[in-house]
Amino acid sequence: MAQEHAEDREKMLRNSVMEWEKMADQYKNIAENERLARQIAETNVSEFDKEKTMLKEEVKQLVARHEKEIQAKDMQIAILSERESELELSRSMNHLNEKAAAVEEAEAEIADLRKKLDLEKMSKRAVILKLEEEMAKRVIDKRGGKQHITRSDLLKKDREIIQQQQENRRLLAKIDELFSDKERMMTDMTKELVDEQLENDALRMELRELKEELDEIRRRRDGTIDDTRSVDSRDSIPHAIRNLPHAGWVSMKPEKRSAGSRKLKWVQYYAVLNHVAFQLFPDEKPHSAAVMSIDTRQLCHVRLVTAADVRVADAEQIRRIFHVG
């Protein structure tokens, strides 16, 4: 009995060992599969990282290419706008030249009509004098006596004079009408010339600004200039100069005192700051002559003054005074 019991126990142990070996083999297979899966996942992650890097590089290249294309298109648009402005200016100048030639032709025609009018007046006056002379003459008869002109001759002469006067009035009315038409035409042409001149001045200013913007775009493209910035001397906050031109009223002190004045009085000027120059005008009229003009490229700094700089101003005024250099 003991031997059978031992054999059964040994058999059970063998079965347990075999089961444990099977389980160990299964766990080994599972571990091997997980190792292979992890290795495959790591390989996939590495490939994904490479693809991600390549995609980022491609995106950068596409963005750079897109920016270059945008810059090229902006340059083309600027060049086309400049050409269009030049063509418009050329057409306006040709139109002005044609109108000026028409005005000169009208003036010449008016002068010719005036000469004709003077000649006509002189000829009519000569005819009238001749008629008066004929009426004053006496007819000498065969006996040496004198006779007055007959009544029929006088009536005939009167009719001729009346006809000549009517003809003169008709010609004068016609000449006055032509003269009025020419004067009206000259007035209209003069107004159109003034309007065209104003439009041309505006087009020239716009063309000059477009050229300056085009030059600035070219310099930025070539990398020759940086972003223009200024620093406020009070709080050292940088800010870009934008939205030119600026305009407004400023006060300046003249270099010399006016006659009979002990103090230098502040003088009001209308200031205009654009990409070209800093200009001062006596008023806001569009065609006023500039009192002072400073090239914008020569402006180095703008700072607040101190009490040592301006001794005749109070604290409230000092905060509103600047020194431009």
Image (spheres, helix red, strand yellow):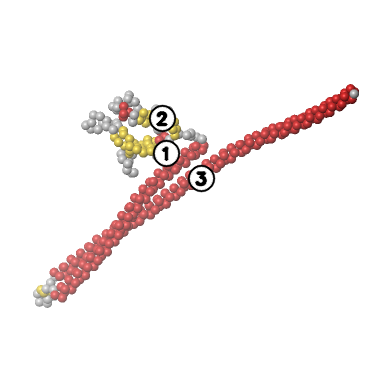
Q: Which amino acid does label 2 sit on?
A: Asp
Q: Residue at x 19, y 69 (%)?
A: 161
- Residue furthest to the bottom in view is 142
Residue 227 in sight in this render: yes
Please identify, in this view, whether the residue under mark 2 or under mark 3 is nearer the observer: 2
Q: Residue 232 — which label?
A: 2
Residue 261 image offset from top left, x and y in percent: 23, 31
Residue 108 in sight in this render: no
Q: Specify few, some or many for label 3: CA neighbours under 10 Å numbering under 14, 14-19, or 20 or more.
A: few
Q: How far apart are marks 2 and 3 (CA)?
A: 37 Å
- Where disc 2 sits, the SS reads loop
Q: Quadrant of the C terminus?
A: top left
Q: In which quarter of the image is the N terminus?
A: top right
Left or right: residue 27 versus residue 124 is: right
Mark 2 or 1, nearer chain start: 2
Picture layout, residue 106 above or below residue 51: below
Left or right: residue 8 versus residue 30 is: right
Left or right: residue 101 versus residue 120 is: right
Q: Residue 243 — which label?
A: 1
Q: What residue type is labelled 3?
A: Gln
Residue 145 image offset from top left, x and y in percent: 9, 74
Residue 150 image offset from top left, x and y in percent: 13, 75
- Where disc 3 sits, the SS reads helix
Q: How far apart are marks 2 and 1 (CA)?
A: 17 Å
Q: Which residue is drawn at 43% across and 42% down?
A: 209
Left or right: residue 296 versus residue 269 is: right
Residue picked out by circle 3 = 76
Please identify, in this view, whether the residue under mark 3 or under mark 1 is nearer the observer: 1
Picture layout, residue 6 above or below residue 171: above
Residue 10 image offset from top left, x and y in percent: 86, 25
- Where disc 1 sits, the SS reads loop
